[in-house]
Amino acid sequence: MVMGIKLIGFRGLAMFSCMPTTLSSGVALTHLAGGNSALALAMTVISNMLGILIVLREFFKGLGDFADQNRKLFLKLSALFLSLVPWIQVSRSRSLLLRVKPAIFLVAIGMGALLHIILLAFNALAIKSLSAVSGGDKSIFSKRENASALVLVASQKTLPVMVAVVEQLGGAFGESGLLVLPCVAAHLNQIIMDSFLVNFWLPKDLSSSNAKIN
């Protein structure tokens, strides 16, 4: 039983690693790091949607105006509803979750953190390689703002999309709550780790900017 719970948790992390980028935190952290926010946003949109073919703007102009006037309210509601989605999935498997030993959950948290570190390292090396083969210091990948945007956004995985995928699978890989729980921890891990990474980058950026001015 314990081994089955472990396998389900690791399957959840494996599915989490296949998800597109986060919907908001990657862009926000890129902006805080002084990176290319436009590139981060473009990556987020492209990775989550292949394209919006038709927008019936004129038919819903009044609704669009209302949304523009209440943008802050809708953003708060969106964040609230998104946070409820994983909680609903986890609650469905409450009886099984109570059987999960804390040690297993800690291992899942550690695996999630390790996954994010691997993604950060892989993307950093990939950007270095792309920069080397596309012009060196003159490459667009050598620009700090582009590199930071690529590293941050490409290394983060979105939780709501993962929850939607689990829902569609209908328990094919195990209980949905057990699949989602380690991914919730991994999602929080990646935001916390990247926040520290951004704070580590900022002093270097400020010192380099001051050196250029002087």
Image (spheres, rainbow, N blue to C red):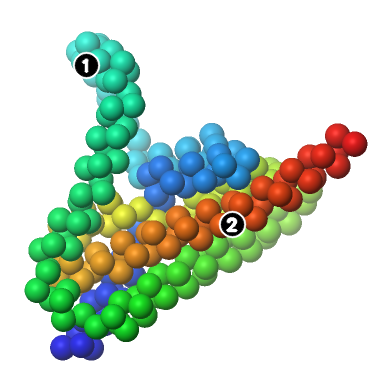
Tell me the residue at 79%/40% (across/down): 209
Q: Looking at the picture, how far across and down is residue 62, in whole percent? A: 22, 11
Residue of label 2: 197
Left or right of 58 in this view: 118: right
Q: Quadrant of residue 70?
A: top left
| Residue found 28% across the figure and 13% down from its top | 65
Residue 8, position in %: x, y? 23, 77
Q: Image height check: is 56 above or below 4?
A: above
- What percent of the width, then of the height, locates residue 80? 25, 42
Q: How many numbered discs, if any?
A: 2
Label 2 SS:
helix
Q: Residue furthest right?
A: 214
Q: Amino acid at mark 2?
A: Leu
Q: Of marks 1 and 2, which one's residue comes earlier in the chain?
A: 1
Q: Name the residue rendered at 12%, 69% in the picture.
A: 94
Q: Quadrant of the N terminus?
A: bottom left
The spot of residue 143 in percent (x, y) is: 70, 44
User: Which residue lies under the disc numbered 1?
Assistant: 63
Front residue (pair 80, 171): 80
Is residue 37 rendered to the left or right of residue 166?
Answer: right
Q: Residue at image x 43%, y 63%? A: 189
Height in image: 179 above or below 142?
Answer: below
